Amino acid sequence: MIRHSRILDILYFSAFAYGIIELVLLLALRISSRMRDLAARVTARPFFVATIYVVLFTIVTAILDFPLSYYAGYVVPHQFKLTGQTFPAWFWDETKGLMIGIIAAVLLIPAALLVIRKFRRWWLGLWLASIPLTVLIVVIVPVVVDPVFNKFEPLKDQVLKQKLLDEAARAGIEGSRVYQVDKSRQTHQMNAYVTGLGPTKRIVMWDTLLAKMNQDEVLAVMGHEMGHYVLLHVWQGVAASIIGSFFVLFLAQRVYEWGIARWGARWRVAGRGDPASLPWLLIIISTISFLGAPVENGISRYFEHQADVFGLELTHLNDAMATSFIKFAEDSKVNPNPSTFIEIWRYSHPSLGHRIDFVLQYKPWDQGKPNELWRSATSSSERRMPRSRAMQSAAAAPRATVPGPTPAPAPTR
């Protein structure tokens, strides 16, 4: 567990450095400007030049990223027996991800470059456009993107389903949707998460989790997920993403234009909005995001702790939640006691050692104390939502139960 976690930590920081070096070389060796020139030979219209450039850029960076992606995504999981997926199946998943990435890049980046080229305060235009886009992405990913990789279907175990529906009713969730997904195609690890907004909001359990945990452990894990659901963590994550992008884009414009003025001629970048400048913009945004990771993960850990509290107050399954965390640690080969630095910078969840200690001792009901977050259905109108300022800065990603570090950043994607 410790050795695997150390490899993941090294890969995280190495992947960031590798991605930045890759982008710098695309600029310094004028590969980026050559791709733009190649696109310009096909069409003279700037928007379509940008579109062709984006396709070339995405393919080139995917090829350059492949050695690291192969080691991190295929070699290491097989080395630690975390997957039985064959190379062709893994490569096909990677190819599907690349195709989705190209489609998304073609739809978004040429339009963003047009805004950068046309408007002096382009950061504000991009930020305003990002607000509905962020909501749209969270809504459509569960029903459009996720099914490309796996099959999602309603929970099959009818006995467990009824227990989960009863648990959801006690949590104050009406019309809840619980899905199982065939993640055993890709991994032996376990997970569950809440994702989506409005009509696409759902709780998802991997089939590996259903196979390896007993009913009490599943109910404990789902109590945690229902906490995310009831406490509106996905909505708060969307709000946080919007707030974060405001500051990122504000700072990015200043650094971007300073760099173009200083090195643009050397890179053969004509000016702001030139497609050849895309690597420079990605360097800036990736670096800001990397340096902001401790803040983002710290807020995420706060949310995860809240979900633990809610789940315990809802179920009183302290021992089952603790044993589920032990299974998560052993199953995913995650170090339960990382260094303080690694936990602060890398972990989106509190470390397992801390979580196990907490869930074994948190029993306010034994001391006659009121619950902190969950109220029974009879007093649902009095359910107290947390008001901490930190709750306004959650990540917009799905709230996963499985503890551990965040994945390595991918600046070029």
Image (tube, rainbow, N blue to C red):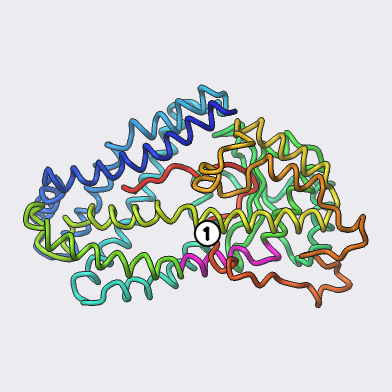
Q: Is residue 326 above or below residue 236?
A: above
- The residue lying at 40 percent from left, 53 percent from top is 291
Q: Nearer the viewer, residue 1 or 158?
A: 1
Q: Is residue 115 visible?
A: yes
* Residue 167 pos. (x, y %): 82, 57
The verdict on residue 255 being magenta is: no
- Does 161 sit left or right of 294 as displayed? right
Asked which secondary structure carries label 1, the reply is loop
Q: Nearer the viewer, residue 297 or 402?
A: 297
Say which residue label 1 marks.
395
Determine the main secondary structure of the stretch shown in magenta: helix
Q: Which residues are magenta?
A: 229-242
- Does 57 sit left or right of 92 as displayed? left
Which of the 4 image quadrants contains residue 369? Answer: bottom right
Which of the 4 image quadrants contains residue 398? Answer: bottom right
Q: Is residue 235 visible?
A: no
* Residue 176 pos. (x, y %): 72, 61
* Residue 142 pos. (x, y %): 55, 56
Which of the 4 image quadrants contains residue 116? Answer: bottom left
Image quadrant in which the N terminus is located: top right
Q: Residue furthest front?
A: 340
* Residue 86 pos. (x, y %): 48, 26
The verdict on residue 231 being magenta is: yes
Q: Is residue 292 above or below residue 93?
A: below
How packed mark 1 is, by other alpha carbons closer than 10 Å (few <14, some 14-19, many 20 or more), is many
Q: Is residue 152 above or below residue 171?
A: above
Numbered label tally: 1
- The residue lying at 59 percent from left, 39 percent from top is 183
- The residue lying at 22 percent from left, 55 percent from top is 280
At label 1, the amino acid type is: Ala
